[in-house]
Image (tube, rainbow, N blue to C red):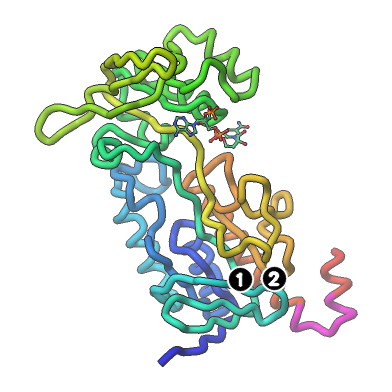
Amino acid sequence: MPETIHTQVLIIGAGPAGYTAAIYAARGGLDPVLVSGLQPGGQLMITTDVENYPGFETAIQGPWLMEQMAKQAEHVGTRVISDLLMNVDFSCRPFRCVGDSGDVYLAETVVIATGAQARWLGLPSEKRLQGAGVSACATCDGFFYRGKQVAVIGGGNTAVEEALYLTHHADKVTLVHRRDSLRAEKILQRRLFSHPKITVVWDSAVEEVTAGGQPEVVNGVTLRNVRSGALSHLAVDGVFIAIGHMPNTTIFRGQVELDDEGYVLTKPGLTQTSVPGVFAAGDVQDKLWRQAITAAGTGCIAALEAEKFLTLQALPTVQAAAQAAE
Ligand code: NDP
């Protein structure tokens, strides 16, 4: 029997942003409900060693970190519900969301924390070798390639930044791009082309990620020259796919303002979206930093903003207007 669930704060998404928002909202006495979606834990569930999340002397596992965040959120009073929201209506308060379960969520405020997904090439070998030499995050995994050779696939700002970042660790970085010019900003291109550790392979698409050993680890990529069709093999220890990200915002189209690439637009320095009372935190509104710690940071801000919003709503109108203007 479908249920109708009323809440002061509905948090959509169970990554670092969502769980942090939940922890703060629960501790603020707001009895939040967190709807966890299909992949609770978000992108950290496909990461192995995490060495850059503060508070841990040695590497921790991404799934373990997310499990701890989930337990902490529940421990302080969050109701976590496993459901997938199918549509949302932010036209008036309480905001109304409907889950795949048929349950209806009525919320005074909403925190959108549905994250983003790295785009992948779609090769079976790429999928099989994720965590065994294939990565979509140089900041997360670059450290493991000290003294080794890596390839970065892509030609945008992310690919160039990742290639430059990887030079701090790897001995040799090869950027592989499918065309003969990059779309990255010129200043980044200049840095890339002048870097002694970086080589660019133009007009090339990845046919396959190759691997050897037991357990299997990446040992190279097979490339196809898109002009001549010629195949070649590039020996590398790691492959970083940097062909863009996709924010998970399909259900929010037409409800809150999104940018050209589908990211939720928020006020500078805040998490307030175009709809008062709806906030967005983490990778769903951040295409630049995309770190667990930055997502957690904006999750915290979203909960505090939601709390402030609810407090102002509860005040008599004149007083609320004066405080909002402060
Ligand atoms: P982009 O969409 O800008 O670039 C994606 C790159 O991947 C393109 O070069 C594209 O090739 C290539 N690509 C896409 N699909 C495939 C495929 N199937 N096979 C091979 N190559 C493929 O994504 P980014 O992540 O680089 O950037 C996203 C946004 O974030 C941009 O607006 C960017 O400016 C911004 N950003 C800004 C930064 C900064 O200001 N410092 C840092 C990082 C990102 P092609 O060029 O042929 O289309």
Total number of numbered labels? 2
Q: Residue furthest front?
A: 228
Position of residue 237 measured from the top left corner of the image (x, y, whole percent): 26, 23
Q: Residue furthest left?
A: 214
Residue 95 left/right relative to 131: right
Residue 97 or residue 207, whichever sits in front: 207
* Residue type highlighted by circle 1: Val
Residue 191 left/right relative to 117: right
Q: Marks 1 and 2, Cα distance to the nearest angstrom?
A: 7 Å
Element assignment for label 2: loop
Specify few, some or many for label 1: CA neighbours under 10 Å numbering under 14, 14-19, or 20 or more.
many
Q: Is residue 263 above or below residue 96?
A: above
Taking the image in four quarters, ligand 1 sits in the one at top right
The residue beneath circle 1 is 110
Q: Residue at x 64, y 23 (%)?
A: 185
* Residue type highlighted by circle 2: Gly
Q: Is residue 47 visible?
A: yes
The image quadrant where one finds the N terminus is: bottom left
> Nearer the N terminus, badge 1 or badge 2?
1
Q: Is residue 169 above or below residue 26?
A: above
Element assignment for label 1: strand
Q: Residue at x 28, y 22 (%)?
A: 222
Specify few, some or many for label 2: CA neighbours under 10 Å numbering under 14, 14-19, or 20 or more.
many
Q: Is residue 295 above or below residue 244?
A: below
Asked if the residues shown at circle 1 and circle 2 are in contact, with their CB atoms under 8 angstroms apart, the answer is yes
| Res 221 quadrant in image | top left
Question: The magenta stretch spans which residues?
Answer: 313-320
The residue beneath circle 2 is 277
Q: Residue at x 26, y 22 (%)?
A: 220
